[in-house]
Image: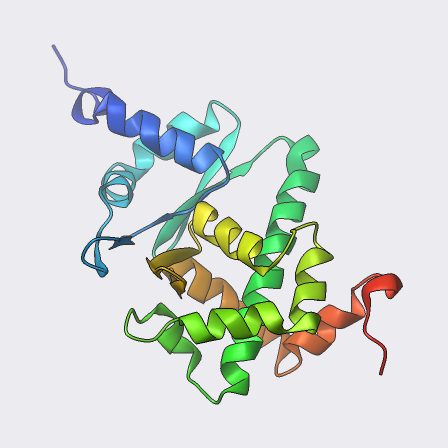
Amino acid sequence: MEITTFDRISSQQSTKIFKTLCQGHVINKLKLNPHTVQYEENPLYTSLFTEQIHFTSLYQHIGFELIHEPLGDFFFVRNIDYSCVDEADDNALKIQAMLIVIGHHYASKGQNLELLTDVNFGISNDDFIALRKNSLYENIITSTSLACIPTGMAFLIKRGFAFKSGADSFVLSQAGMLFLERLQESNSNELVEDAVETLPSEVQLSD
């Protein structure tokens, strides 16, 4: 009997990959071990990468486009059904808003944004407190229907754009860092200013 890709891939692992991707999450090459607070290889990514042709064909047959982002080393899927675009755009806006305020806060301290993925730096407890106390940041986040900064951070973690590295400390994943860098490139040094312009007038701060 001929061995197919379905025979080589664990059905349990394939199911886990499917659920993760179809819930709008990304699958990063590296994941953060919460016990050792160290990065380690993600077996879901390894399986996707090794059998990329198989998974690409499989998802095409059920209405999804599997996308590999080589610069950030992560996978995600795009729904081919355009009726789902509004929900995807809404989620993207929430992710963008959180990354904007994190990036602006970090840059305002004069720190290199690349440290956001470093478990020895990242978003510290003090950073998290500062983000929550900043009314402008809070307004940007709540304008996207997220309840508050902690809710926004939980959203990033759930979607695979950040990892929890301590009680109230976090790091960005490879996917989160790549998206932040692209936001920085497109908006130059005016990340928050541009975001404020998109806020409804009732939540914009007065001069």
Can the viewer see residue 106 in this picture? yes
99 and 34: which one is in front? 34
180 and 80: which one is in front? 180
Q: What x and y, as percent, mark residue 90?
A: 67, 47
Q: What x and y, as percent, mark residue 14?
A: 30, 28
Tell me the residue at 29%/52% (across/down): 29
Tell me the residue at 49%/37% (across/down): 65
Look at the image and tell me in which quarter the C terminus lies.
bottom right
Question: In which image quadrant can residue 173 be found?
Answer: bottom left
Look at the image and tell me in which quarter the N terminus lies.
top left
Of all residues, the one furthest to the left in this rendering is 1
Tell me the residue at 32%/35% (across/down): 53
Tell me the residue at 55%/86% (across/down): 108
Location of residue 117 with respect to 148 vertically, above or below: below
Location of residue 169 with respect to 112 vertically, above or below: above
Location of residue 61 with respect to 17 vertically, above or below: above
51 and 1: which one is in front? 51
Can the viewer see residue 72 in this picture? no
**Residue 155 relative to residue 116: left or right:** right
**Residue 38 relative to residue 148: left or right:** left
Location of residue 181 with respect to 19 vertically, above or below: below
